């Protein structure tokens, strides 16, 4: 259903001034375009990616760092003037965000990084970072009275959408590669989504979802295609700066870290991290842009390759990493993902799959954070960057865990080994301990 102009304005944020194409520079009024700019409506990485623009002066009249800190609502709803939704009540009734920023003393001792923090986004309602974006997708679909929301996903974006949709009473159709881990598919089925497991890669699922949405008029949440997903994801940067200030001795209501590490597949999360800090700089609420580090698997290196070679856009790869959430052939949010690293003075960091799986152990044993492989990849990237001299021991460094380890227990068991089975006798306990 298409909303007419008069009612549309009530459904749109009064702080959003429009959308700007990052490819050709075209500007659109709020609601004038749905997903990507007509300059590049094609498939793959070469999309007319849109950036949502705000009236920061109006935002600053509505919220301040102090009011955000004082807000009893710890969810992303407290940031509503900086979100593309009419009001905080537009969000589904399943709070997202407000995840802990952990001081991890034993991980600090183990690494020698005295100001290391872990932002644990595995502790969102559907156990991944993707809840931040899916809440916005459901809010917008409901504002536009769209009966069905669809997405392509490696698993987590879909699980997040399915959960938010269940809370709001919204129907969903999900396209996942049939190789998605069973826990993620189980989440979709339990939440009541219509699940289409595509006999192909994530990229195949993506293209099919795009076609189906055009054909059937469904609202498309797909990452890197729907410009509003970045806006949900950027809230992690607001939270990090507020939490660093809350946990420090100073008076500043917000504090930017020196460096942030996050794993990268399509590039939407890293683009969101960047957008969040850019908003805070534009508002004058932080003083500098942190260096942003994007971590990719050597078996899914499209954005790393583009960054290394100085290319404007990535060349597709044949992705095959065990970290399924970052296994992407043609990254859809490439423009934002490359700008995040280039404009912040960060880097792309490449890690082997073995290092990703191994990183799950120290993260859990010293940090008590059980991450899925794509989450642990960010920590593996930090270890690599630390070896390469990209971070200093006293710097404030934040590693974002993007997903819970319960999403993929098979990957965890690959590095822990199998459990020992014993006879129910004390003798068996004794001989096992002696062994
Ligand atoms: C989606 C996802 C990522 C990567 O995010 P992109 O926006 O695709 O770069 C990383 N980790 C987890 C757990 C994810 O679900």
Image (cartoon, grey):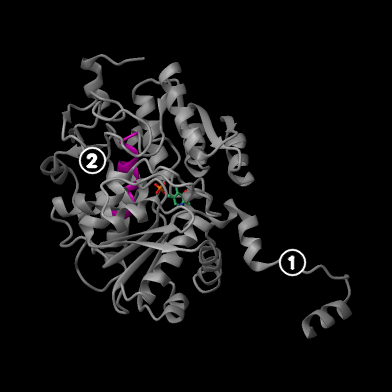
Q: Can residue 168 be spotted in the picture? A: no
Residue at screen point 60% across, 34% down: 199
Crowd around label 1: few <14 · some 14–19 · many ≥20 (10 Å): few
Mark identifier at residue 265? none
Left or right, 245 with reference to 329: left
Please name whichever residue, 103 or 114, is drawn nearer the observer in this view of the structure.
Answer: 114
Residue reaching furthest to the left: 57
| Quadrant (top left/top right/bottom left/bottom right) for the N terminus | top left
Question: How many numbered discs?
Answer: 2
What range is drawn magenta here? 226-237
Give the left or right position of residue 103, taking residue 71 as reference: right
At which x and y percent is residue 66? 21, 56
Q: Is residue 54 magenta?
A: no
Could you say where residue 262 lies in the image, as x and y percent from the top left? Answer: 38, 58
Disc 1 to disc 2, C-alpha distance: 50 Å
Instruction: Identify the residue at image location x=35%, y=65%.
Output: 398
Judging by the rendered image, the residue that carries numbered circle 1 is 419
* Numbered disc 2: secondary structure: helix
Q: Which residue is mark 2?
A: 81
User: Could you say where residue 182 lies in the image, as x and y percent from the top left?
Assistant: 64, 44
């Amino acid at each position: 259903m298409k909303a007419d102009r008069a009612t549309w304005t009530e459904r749109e944020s009064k702080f959003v001034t429009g959308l700007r194409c990052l490819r050709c520079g075209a500007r659109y009024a709020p609601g004038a375009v749905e997903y990507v700019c007509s300059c590049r409506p094609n498939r793959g990485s070469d999309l007319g990616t849109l950036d949502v623009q705000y009236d920061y002066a109006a935002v600053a009249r509505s919220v301040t760092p102090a009011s955000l800190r004082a807000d009893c609502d710890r969810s992303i709803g407290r940031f509503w003037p900086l979100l593309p939704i009419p009001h905080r009540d537009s969000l589904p009734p399943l709070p997202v965000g407000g995840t802990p920023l952990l001081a991890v003393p034993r991980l600090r001792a183990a690494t020698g990084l005295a100001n290391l923090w872990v932002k644990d986004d595995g502790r969102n309602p559907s156990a991944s970072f993707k809840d931040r974006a899916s809440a916005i997708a459901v809010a917008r679909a409901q504002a536009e009275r769209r009966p069905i929301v669809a997405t392509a996903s490696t698993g987590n974006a879909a699980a997040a959408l399915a959960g938010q949709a269940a809370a709001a009473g919204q129907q969903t159709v999900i396209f996942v590669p049939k190789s998605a881990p069973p826990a993620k598919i189980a989440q979709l089925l339990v939440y009541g989504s219509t699940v289409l497991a595509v006999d192909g890669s994530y990229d195949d699922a993506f293209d099919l979802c795009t076609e189906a949405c055009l054909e059937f008029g469904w609202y498309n949440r797909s990452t890197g295609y729907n410009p509003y997903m970045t806006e949900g994801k950027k809230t992690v940067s607001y939270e990090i700066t507020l939490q660093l200030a809350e946990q420090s001795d100073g008076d500043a209501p917000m504090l930017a870290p020196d460096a942030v590490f996050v794993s990268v597949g399509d590039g939407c999360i890293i683009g969101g991290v960047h957008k969040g800090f850019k908003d805070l700089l534009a508002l004058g609420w932080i003083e500098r842009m942190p260096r942003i580090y994007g971590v990719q698997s050597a078996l899914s290196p499209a954005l790393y390759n583009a960054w290394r070679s100085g290319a404007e856009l990535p060349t597709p790869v044949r992705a095959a990493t065990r970290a399924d959430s970052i296994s992407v052939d043609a990254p859809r949010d490439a423009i934002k993902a490359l700008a995040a690293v280039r404009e912040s003075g960060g880097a792309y960091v490449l890690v082997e799959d073995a290092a990703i799986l191994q990183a799950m152990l120290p993260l859990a044993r010293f940090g008590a954070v059980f991450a899925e492989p794509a989450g642990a990849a960010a920590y593996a990237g930090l270890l690599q960057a630390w070896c390469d001299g990209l971070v200093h021991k006293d710097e404030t460094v934040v590693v974002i865990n993007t997903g819970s380890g319960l999403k993929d227990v098979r990957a965890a068991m690959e590095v822990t080994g199998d459990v020992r089975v014993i006879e129910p006798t004390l003798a068996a306990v004794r001989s096992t301990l002696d062994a």
